[in-house]
Image: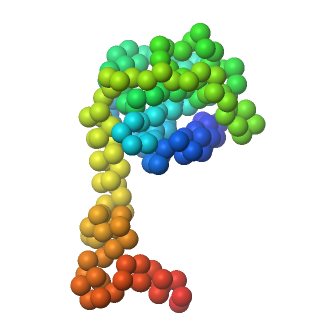
């Protein structure tokens, strides 16, 4: 199984629980989550590990040695069936196994009430900056609402341009 496949499965699984899910977005220097999602103020993180060697290397990360530095209230490892065992897990981490396109929960994550909220806000801010770069000069808040204040001043309803463009 490839890493990208695990990430896809993690995104699909987490999307059933979270209203916002982001994946493989390198923005925070200390931690780059494979998949992270938010349902309100609580974040859930998934680290995807294809091999046992990759999982063992992960333990050397600063955010693993000091869990307060890590992002997310709940944290999971996702691996192909049997690659990571319950006995291998750090305290409070959950374990998900992937097999034939499905995820099974081997252990629920317990929760990290002391986590790095600053890193989560920096991560979300970086994602919003990337969105702003992609939409150009239009204000991000208007784009997120599907509005354009200049069109609104002229009496053009939101999304009228996109509907008109689609009819051409």
The residue at the point 47 percent across, 27 percent down is 75
**Drawn side of residue 104 relative to residue 45, left or right:** right
Q: Residue furthest top?
A: 87
Residue 154 in picture, x, y percent from top left:
26, 89
Residue 1 in picture, x, y percent from top left:
69, 34
Front residue of 108/132: it is 108
Is residue 63 depicted above or below 71 in this figure? above
Q: How is the image coloured?
A: rainbow
The residue at the point 59 percent across, 21 percent down is 107
Q: Residue furthest front?
A: 40
Is residue 99 depicted above or below 12 in this figure? above
Residue 55 in picture, x, y percent from top left:
55, 20
Q: How many marks?
A: 0
The residue at the point 71 percent across, 40 percent down is 101
Residue 160 in picture, x, y percent from top left:
42, 83
Q: Residue furthest right?
A: 100
Report if residue 57 is visible in the image: no
**Drawn side of residue 117 relative to residue 164, left or right:** left
The residue at the point 38 percent across, 14 percent down is 65
Front residue of 100/59: it is 100
- Quarter location, residue 106: top right
**Drawn side of residue 85 relative to residue 101, left or right:** left
Report if residue 100 is visible in the image: yes
- Quarter location, residue 121: top left
């Amino acid at each position: 199984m490839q890493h990208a496949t695990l990430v896809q499965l993690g995104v699909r699984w987490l999307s059933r629980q979270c209203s916002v899910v982001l994946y493989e977005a390198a923005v925070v220097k200390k931690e780059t989550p494979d998949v992270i999602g938010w349902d309100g103020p609580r974040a859930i993180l998934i680290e995807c590990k294809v091999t046992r060697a990759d999982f063992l290397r992960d333990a050397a990360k600063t955010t693993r040695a000091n869990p307060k530095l890590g992002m997310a209230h709940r944290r999971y490892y996702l691996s192909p069936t049997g690659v990571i065992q319950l006995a291998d897990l750090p305290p409070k981490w959950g374990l998900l196994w992937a097999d034939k396109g499905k995820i099974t929960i081997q252990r629920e994550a317990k929760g990290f009430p002391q986590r790095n909220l600053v890193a989560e806000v920096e991560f979300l801010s970086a994602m919003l900056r990337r969105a702003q770069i992609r939409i150009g000069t239009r204000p991000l808040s208007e784009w997120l609402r599907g509005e354009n204040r200049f069109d609104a001043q002229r009496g053009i309803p939101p999304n009228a341009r996109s509907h008109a463009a689609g009819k051409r």
